[in-house]
């Protein structure tokens, strides 16, 4: 009896930790994140459910982990854990004489002295609740990475298809939003850009950045390896057809950042389609000169036709005055003017709190101390709209060092890629795709804060792992070729 129960438990464990179960868990978690984590605000009600689910999915990933399979692939995960460790350090209470000696704390010491209040032990962060919230928010990207690291090699490629599918759903959702009223139930968040094509997000800029990244992924998917010629043709033409839908949608979204980032995204997609042609051409049955020439001619025709149609679609969007993004790019924009006026204030904040920072998540509260009188308005600023400055303001020198470590690591990977370029026929194009997607998110962070959105940071984290995996594959191929 006991043996039968043990066997049943073992079978159940194998079923829930098998390859299919791990992939379904990854896909289910990303789906939940996209539908419940499209806003950067910390008071969104869906986070009450999403974050505990992230912890549960993370616990599942740990129970299924295979450390041998994780070896050499965990650098992005360590970066996220380093940020979590920094946030924990910011929450440790400090003695009054230490806390008051920190940069930027004198004003609080003066207030306490004037009020006759004795200074208590306080953590480094100026808003412990906001820093604790930032710490909990990391559960989502960390769980996403762990779930991806548990996937086998075949399902890692399928993970990209899951991301493309979710992004396409967001695009389709945006189209339905445009066909309904401005206060349609299709808008998932109370504080959002009503009447605009925001998709599964609360902010049109975040939707636009995701769409530009999807263009790059679709360019990669159009030329990714297929088992038959029919599958290759289906992936090629369906990917390009979706790009045709996304391009005018970015114009209609009204995001200046989306319009600017769309240009490098389209160029990268076209390069991947044209040069990354590792479809049926890689199969032995298609290696005759006649077949190669035929496929090459077909790819050229598709490429140039796509360029023509995309330019035509963009022109029609502008001509029919449906391009809010185009109008904002060349017109006056009060929001953009405000962002440029904020730079001196943000620079002063960064200097005043250097080297320890004000604490992650504290920007909204700290900015009120520095807010210039001429910028006072009925609305308030919840983020700096420039993560390249807000990150060191909140995290100080330790955050800068963590970011520098990630940058140096990425630069080393690119140097290795250039060295091993000729040894990898197919994998290098996946590396380019992943790198470009991350660069688009980082570029979008110059004038906004897309990486503070749970779904975007989860996608960024998974793409960083995909980049790592394929760089490792490039190096293995190069080593085999040399030996």
Image (cartoon, rainbow, N blue to C red):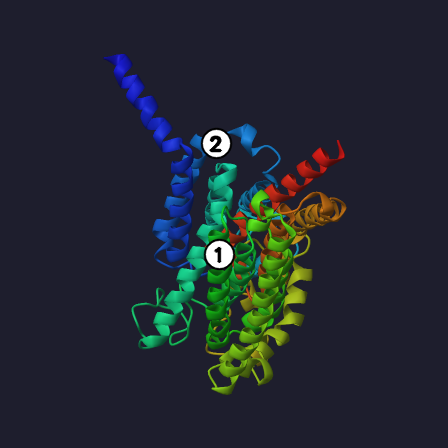
Where does the image place residue 357, in percent across and percent down from the top left?
Answer: 62, 54
Q: Mark 1 packing: few (<14 Cα in 10 Å), some, or many (20+)? A: many
Where does the image place residue 216, in percent across and percent down from the top left?
Answer: 56, 60
As drawn, the label of residue 235 is: 1
* Residue at (65% x, 71% y) in the render: 343
Task: Left or right? Give the position of 206 relative to 308.
Answer: left
| Residue nearest the observer in this picture, 117 or 373 | 373
Tag 1 secondary structure: helix
As drawn, the label of residue 476 is: none
Relative vertical location of residue 476 with respect to residue 418 in this rendering, above or below: above
Decide: marks 1, 2 in contact (CB < 8 A)? no
Where does the image place residue 379, in percent across and percent down from the top left?
Answer: 46, 75
User: Foreground mark, 1 or 2?
Assistant: 1
Image quarter of residue 43: bottom left
Mark 2 sits on what residue? 65
Quarter of the N terminus within the rendering: top left
Task: Left or right? Give the position of 413 relative to 300.
Answer: right
| Residue nearest the observer in this picture, 366 or 8 | 8
The reply to whether residue 370 is in sight is: no
Relative vertical location of residue 341 with respect to residue 32 in this rendering, above or below: below
* Residue at (50% x, 53% y) in the render: 232
Task: Left or right? Give the position of 438 relative to 204.
Answer: right
Relative vertical location of residue 371 with respect to residue 297 in this rendering, above or below: below
Q: Mark 2 packing: few (<14 Cα in 10 Å), some, or many (20+)? A: some
* Residue at (58% x, 80% y) in the render: 329
Tag 2 secondary structure: loop
The reply to whether residue 223 is in sight is: yes
Where does the image place residue 398, in percent across and percent down from the top left?
Answer: 66, 48
């Amino acid at each position: 009896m006991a043996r039968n129960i043990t066997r049943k438990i073992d079978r159940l464990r194998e079923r829930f930790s098998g390859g299919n179960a791990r992939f379904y868990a990854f896909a289910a978690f990303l789906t939940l994140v996209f539908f419940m984590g499209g806003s950067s605000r910390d008071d969104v009600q869906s986070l009450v459910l999403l974050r505990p689910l992230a912890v549960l999915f993370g616990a599942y990933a740990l129970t299924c982990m295979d450390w041998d399979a994780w070896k050499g692939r965990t650098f992005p995960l360590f970066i996220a854990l380093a940020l979590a460790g920094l946030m924990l350090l910011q929450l440790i209470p400090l003695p009054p004489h230490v806390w008051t000696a920190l940069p930027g704390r004198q004003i609080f010491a003066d207030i306490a002295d004037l009020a006759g209040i004795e200074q208590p032990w306080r953590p480094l962060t100026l808003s412990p609740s906001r820093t604790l919230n930032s710490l909990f928010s990391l559960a989502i990207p960390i769980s996403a990475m762990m779930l991806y690291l548990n996937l086998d090699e075949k399902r890692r490629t399928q993970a990209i298809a899951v991301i493309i599918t979710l992004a396409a759903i967001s695009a389709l959702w945006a189209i339905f939003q445009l066909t309904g009223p401005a206060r349609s139930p299709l808008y998932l968040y109370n504080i959002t850009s009503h009447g605009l094509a925001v998709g599964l997000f609360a902010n049109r800029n975040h939707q636009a950045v995701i769409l530009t990244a999807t263009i790059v992924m679709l360019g990669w998917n159009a030329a990714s390896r297929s088992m038959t010629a029919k599958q290759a043709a289906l992936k090629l033409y369906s990917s390009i057809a979706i790009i045709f839908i996304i391009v005018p949608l970015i114009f209609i979204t009204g995001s200046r950042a989306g319009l600017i980032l769309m240009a490098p995204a389209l160029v990268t997609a076209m390069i991947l389609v044209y040069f990354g042609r590792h479809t049926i051409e890689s199969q032995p049955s298609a290696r005759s000169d006649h077949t190669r020439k035929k496929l090459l001619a077909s790819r050229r025709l598709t490429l140039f036709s796509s360029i023509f149609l995309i330019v035509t679609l963009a022109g029609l969007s502008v001509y029919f005055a449906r391009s809010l993004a185009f109008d904002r790019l060349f017109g006056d924009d009060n929001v953009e003017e405000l962002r440029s006026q904020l730079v001196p204030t943000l620079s002063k904040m960064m200097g005043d709190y250097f080297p320890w920072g004000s604490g992650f998540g504290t920007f909204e509260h700290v900015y009120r101390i520095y807010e210039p009188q001429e910028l006072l308005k009925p609305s308030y600023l919840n983020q700096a709209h420039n993560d390249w400055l807000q990150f060191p303001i909140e995290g100080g020198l330790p955050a800068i060092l963590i970011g520098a470590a990630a940058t140096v690591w990425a630069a080393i990977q690119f140097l290795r890629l250039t060295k091993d370029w000729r040894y990898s026929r197919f994998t290098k194009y996946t590396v380019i795709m992943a790198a470009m997607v991350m660069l688009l998110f980082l570029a979008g962070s110059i004038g906004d804060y897309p990486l503070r959105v749970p779904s975007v940071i989860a996608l960024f984290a998974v793409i960083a792992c995909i980049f790592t995996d394929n760089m490792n594959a490039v190096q293995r191929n190069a080593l085999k070729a040399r030996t």
